[in-house]
Amino acid sequence: MARCVARELVERSGVDAERLVDLLVERALGEIGNYYYYTLLRMHLVGVEGDLLRRVVDDAREEDRNHFEVLIPRIYELGGRLPATFTGELGPLGGLRNLPAEADVPEILPVLLRSAEESVRAYTHLCGITSGKDHRTYNIALAILHEEIAHQVWFLEFLGRGVAEQQIRHPRAISPFVTQFLQSQRVSAFQSHSFPA
Ligand SMILES: [Fe+2]
């Protein structure tokens, strides 16, 4: 493997870089898997209750895609890469595959909630192993963690309060914590494609 300064610095600070990259790749595949399964799910949600849940799913879906986008640069900075192909389960929302085709909202919600809880656990772990050592990965993981906790709360609210309360749910901007990393990616992409003076 070519010399990778970011990886060297992370290792020097006491982080197992190989394990960290494995975890980041696992999360990235989980995020894009969630995006995929949310996309399938939103086509399945019908009726008043289904329509309301779809609005929540749409927000979570967009944010999970953003989580995927911000993880990728860090994986490559650390000398890792995504697998060219993959097999097996694509993230915790794969549990949706086990539901019958006619599953309704009360059956779907626990799967969504378990998936959000698993994400919260995973990003809490990532924050724990990078805190005070790998500041960049820590900041990215913490930003995603804030949004995963919001997903958990959205599903809990839906589960506990029912449809009436969901109708007055106040939407917030998409990815309020992760957007800063997406913006910095766009700036660096622009700079790398700008013409020399
Ligand atoms: Fe996510």
Image: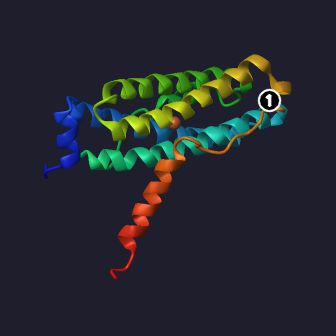
Binning the other alpha carbons within 10 Å of mark 1 as few (below 14), some (14 to 19) or many (20 upward) gives some
Image-based side of 41 in relation to 95, left or right: right
Where, quadrant-wise, is the C terminus in this rendering?
A: bottom left
Residue 28 in which image quadrant: top left
Task: Find out if the beta carbon at label 1 lies less than 8 Å from the nearest ligand 1 atom.
Answer: no
Residue 56 appears left or right of 49? left
Looking at the picture, does residue 67 appear above or below residue 186? above
Tell me residue 193's x, y (percent).
38, 72
- Residue occupying the point 50% across, 31% down: 145
Instruction: Tell me where residue 117 appears, x and y as whole percent.
Output: 53, 22
Residue 11 vertical position relative to residue 99 in the rendered view, above or below: below
Q: Amino acid at mark 1?
A: Gln
In the rendered view, tell whether residue 197 sits above or below residue 21.
below
Residue indicated by mark 1: 166
Q: In the image, residue 10 lies at what x, y percent?
A: 23, 37
Q: Is residue 130 above or below residue 76?
A: above
Question: Would residue 82 be visible to someone looking at this image?
Answer: no
Name the image quarter holding residue 131. top left
Task: Tell me which residue sits at (26%, 45%) in the image.
Answer: 78
Element type at mark 1: helix
Given residues 114 and 167, the one toward you in this image is: 167
Task: Identify the residue shown where x is 51% and y is 43%.
Answer: 178
**The one of 142 and 93 positioned closer to us in this rendering:** 142
Q: How is the image coloured?
A: rainbow
> Residue lying farthest bottom?
197
Number of numbered discs visible in the structure rendering = 1
